[in-house]
Amino acid sequence: MKTKSKLIYRSENTCFQTLLPVYFYGMPDGKMLVLYTRFKSENPLDTTQEWIVAQHLDFTYNFESGRIYTMTGQEVSFEEFMELADNLEQRIRPLEWFGSFYNNREAQSYFNHHKYNMLNKTKTIKIEADEYLSAIEI
């Protein structure tokens, strides 16, 4: 089963956490997820990369209308979002890490074949977190 999601924006050259491609997805539950690759280590000799799936903490997405909102409820135009998305001042919460790739071609190939599984994994994380929190409250 494929996860229902909408690709909002793909940035090839961004200041966001990495100089590698970044994908912004809108989810039916109103969340905006960010998928990006980064180097696993700060060691310049280690070029191993990994995919990160993170929740964007500055924006929400109305799946039905296709509109983007700030967390304060202010609507943001697509052009304005593109400018803001390429800013260094992004707040995200990493949810899951995937893979160990030796170059960007390997990482991109993995993404092309597994993006829906990567997005779907975040639902599992939310369910596990909700179950854990509800067990604590009892």
Image: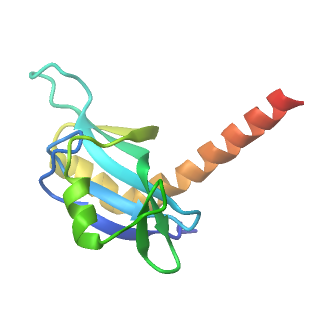
The residue depicted at 16 percent of the width and 45 percent of the height is 15
| Quadrant assignment for the C terminus | top right
The residue depicted at 21 percent of the width and 41 percent of the height is 88
What percent of the width, then of the height, locates residue 18? 19, 41
Say which quarter of the image contains residue 93: top left
Tell me if I can see residue 97 in this picture.
no
Q: Nearer the viewer, residue 81 or 119?
A: 81
What percent of the width, then of the height, locates residue 56? 41, 49
In the displayed orientation, state which residue is furthest to the bottom.
Answer: 65
**30 to 22, vertically: above or below:** below
The reply, left or right, for residue 25 in relation to residue 2 is left
What percent of the width, then of the height, locates residue 104? 17, 47
| Quadrant assignment for the N terminus | bottom right
Q: Nearer the viewer, residue 115 or 18?
A: 18
In the displayed orientation, state which residue is furthest to the right.
Answer: 138
**126 to 102, vertically: above or below:** below
The residue depicted at 22 percent of the width and 48 percent of the height is 106
**48 to 96, vertically: above or below:** above
Q: Nearer the viewer, residue 134 or 42?
A: 134
What percent of the width, then of the height, locates residue 126? 63, 46
The reply, left or right, for residue 13 in relation to residue 9 is left
The residue depicted at 28 percent of the width and 71 percent of the height is 78
Q: Nearer the viewer, residue 78 or 38?
A: 78
